[in-house]
Image (cartoon, rainbow, N blue to C red):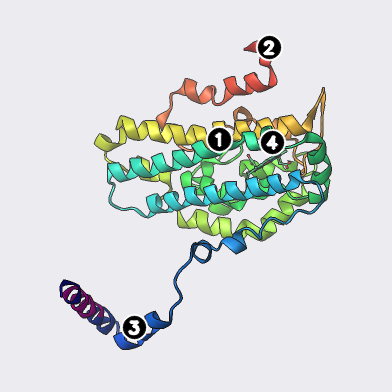
Amino acid sequence: MKDKERIDSQIEKLEEKYKDSGQDLSSYLDGLLHQRYLTYWDYINLDTLLSLQQPRTYFPDEEIFIMYHQITELYFKLILHEQKQLVDDKSQNLDFFIEKVRRINSYYKALISSFSIMIKGMEREQFLQYRMALLPASGFQSAQFRMIEIYSTPLENLVHQSQRENFSSENSIEELYEQIYWKRGATDMSTGDKTLTLKQFEYRYTPRLVRIAKQVRGNTIYHKYLQLPETKRYNKELVDALKKMDINANVNWPLMHMGSAHRYLAKGEGQVDATGGTNWKEYLPPSFQKVVFFPEIYSKQELNNWGKQWVDHIFNPEKK
Ligand code: HEM
């Protein structure tokens, strides 16, 4: 009897719900009657997910390379998922801000600590061969990596550091976008020639990235922080979480990533060309790129030393 009462009350609520939107509950109940039980594999699209690893060669380690990139892209998506909520938030609620940034940091933590899969988990000999079948593709073409940057900070902070002081929020999005650090990394500055990797990326993603940059103009995570009232802006937990995020995104992840470039592409005094065609030894180190999402929260000295000691550690281990 108790069950019957419960069901009656549920049906009443359902009737209200469907009436409100001009729908007929009885038809929906028929649908429920015929619907299959949900399974785990359908819910998470497991068959599709596991069909997405399609190597271009017969080297077994290429599958590891594909899967780890896919795992990383899913984590990037999780990061973006939190970033979008932060950008959309109008409440200026401190706990919400801290919670979201902490989640972002926990995703970075997983990425940073799992990079050993790339650094130690593949045979160099296999890598050097199957990568030739992947030309001119490069992780450089990860659009989500760029979106994370664009949601975090205004484009003027992503301008190549040699040009940064010549640009400001006064410039148009298009002007700033043209000077972004990663474009320069893949352009021969003496001839102005862009690598094919960059040209293809631009063709595919420029409209989308410019649209996002316009959409978040004046409203990036950095702006959200600067717009907080002073009492909240100096909150230590928030500042610590933001610093951590900045360092995760612009120092620690890039360093782990550079560790893998070093392991596979450096040979003695020379180096192997990268598939994306950048001069990677110059381009990848965080202290050379000096991308900082939230410059306001650091001292001058912290900014000057951005990522430096770690790069020394990798390239000049004897200095340590
Ligand atoms: C063996 C492993 C890896 C090696 C040797 C490697 C190498 C490189 C190199 C040399 C570049 C410079 C661009 C170029 O000329 O191609 C680059 C850029 C990049 N790679 Fe990788 N990579 C590896 C793994 C990954 C993974 C797992 C991801 C995850 C998505 C990734 C994402 C990126 C991104 C986002 C960039 C651009 C970085 C920036 O602009 O600062 N890479 N990679």
- Secondary structure, magenta segment, majority class: helix
Give the labeled residue for mark 4: 121
Q: Earlier in the sequence, mark 1 or mark 2?
A: 1
**Residue shown at 54% from the left, 26% from the top:** 306
The quarter of the displayed image where residue 20 is located: bottom left
Quick one: SS at disc 2?
A: helix
Q: CA distance from mark 1 to mark 4?
A: 14 Å
CB under 8 Å between discs 1 and 4 = no
Q: CA distance from mark 2 to mark 3?
A: 72 Å
Q: Quadrant of ligand 1?
A: top right
Q: Earlier in the sequence, mark 1 or mark 3?
A: 3
Give the labeled residue for mark 1: 112
Q: Amino acid at mark 2?
A: Glu
Q: Earlier in the sequence, mark 4 or mark 2?
A: 4
User: Is residue 155 one of those drawn in magenta?
Assistant: no
**Residue shown at 52% from the left, 42% from the top:** 156
Q: Which numbered disc, 1 or 4, marks the residue closer to the eye?
A: 4
Give the labeled residue for mark 3: 29
Q: Nearer the viewer, residue 123 or 278?
A: 123
Note whether 5 is above or below 164 in the view shown.
Answer: below
**Residue shown at 63% from the left, 33% from the top:** 116
Q: Does 42 sit left or right of 98 as displayed?
A: right
Q: Which numbered disc, 4 or 2, marks the residue closer to the eye?
A: 4
User: Is residue 8 one of those drawn in magenta?
Assistant: yes
Q: Amino acid at mark 4?
A: Gly
The magenta stretch spans which residues?
5-14
Q: Earlier in the sequence, mark 3 or mark 4?
A: 3
Q: Which numbered disc, 1 or 2, marks the residue closer to the eye?
A: 1
